[in-house]
Amino acid sequence: MHEKSPLLKASLRDRVGSRYSERYRKQGKLPAVVYGHKLDPVAIAIDAKDSLSHFHKGEKVFRIEIPGGKGDDMVLLKDVQFDYLGNNIVHADFARVTLDERIHTKVRVTLIGEAIGMKQAGAILMHPATEIEVECKVRDIPDHIEVSITDLDMGQTITADKVKLPIPDMKLVTDPHAVVAQIVLGVELKIAEETTVAADGTEPEVITAKKAEGEEGAAAAKPGAAPAKGAPPAKGAAPAAKGAAPAPGAKPAPGAKK
């Protein structure tokens, strides 16, 4: 499958480091490194536009032409590094491989068909795991794996172990319980989100008219609190102490001794 993999022409990088890598990028090159098979790592630079177009198509296996090498090297794209914004690829790692070598790699999952569960009002198709990791020979690495969702109904789930692998000796490495596709109601999704928010133990304070009245009553019930102007004394309240001096400017009660 990969005997005619894309060819990337590389030049050797005589200096490494972030400052020099930036210079290569300004020249339209993508800094990279090739390693593996008990050989020394080689710092290279490849055409950025050409290589990134293959990366975005999902290509993983390449032939690299390195100056001074013995023909083309078959390599597997192992990793890419992004800039600090996470938007642009700024570096690539390639591992030397052979076509019959068994490796672990991630493969994109493509959902095909129209699920019967999507005919219900409010239905939402979830696709949590967009890739699955498999073990297979380099020559057998697929560009993607198709998963039919035609029979997927409301509340049903397709997990990784239900995905049909295209090659008999291909093995699933991803957690078999990883959810690849699922149909849920929008209401259920909203409840799940609210439950997640409430799980931190924070409850919003609800202010109501009754609560305000209760707070006023509580304030009036505080020991030593004076009754409101014109309000009768509270039931069972103790009378003023005998002989207590009236407040300054207050008129004496009728019949009271001066």
Image: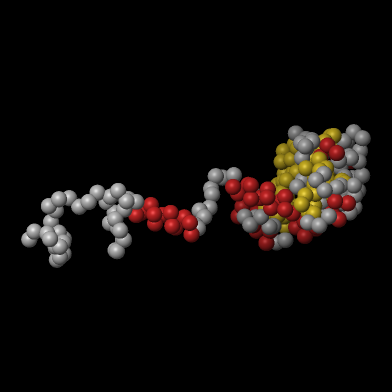
Q: Position of residue 86 (x, y in %)?
A: 66, 55
Q: Which residue is drawn at 85% across and 47% down?
A: 153
Residue 77, visible in the rendered structure: no
Residue 247 is drawn in which quadrant?
bottom left
* Viewer-proximal residue among 239 and 101: 239
Q: Position of residue 79 (x, y in %)?
A: 73, 46
Q: Residue 167 appears at what percent x and percent y?
A: 91, 38
Q: Residue 134, relative to residue 203: is it above or below?
A: above
| Quadrant of the snapshot with the C terminus | bottom left
Can residue 212 be seen by looking at this rendering?
yes
In what quadrant of the picture does the N terminus appear?
top right
Q: Which colour scheme appears in the figure?
A: secondary structure
Above or below, 93 relative to 38: below
Residue toward you, 121 or 73: 121
**Residue pushed farthest left?**
258
Q: Residue at x 12, y 52 (%)?
A: 243
Q: Quick one: 181 or 51, which is closer to the camera?
A: 181
Q: How many labels does the image show?
A: 0
Residue at 68% across, 48% down: 192
Residue 252, given in percent of the width and then of the height, sits at 14, 62
- Vertical arrangement, residue 133 with respect to residue 232, above or below: above
Q: Residue at x 32, y 51 (%)?
A: 235
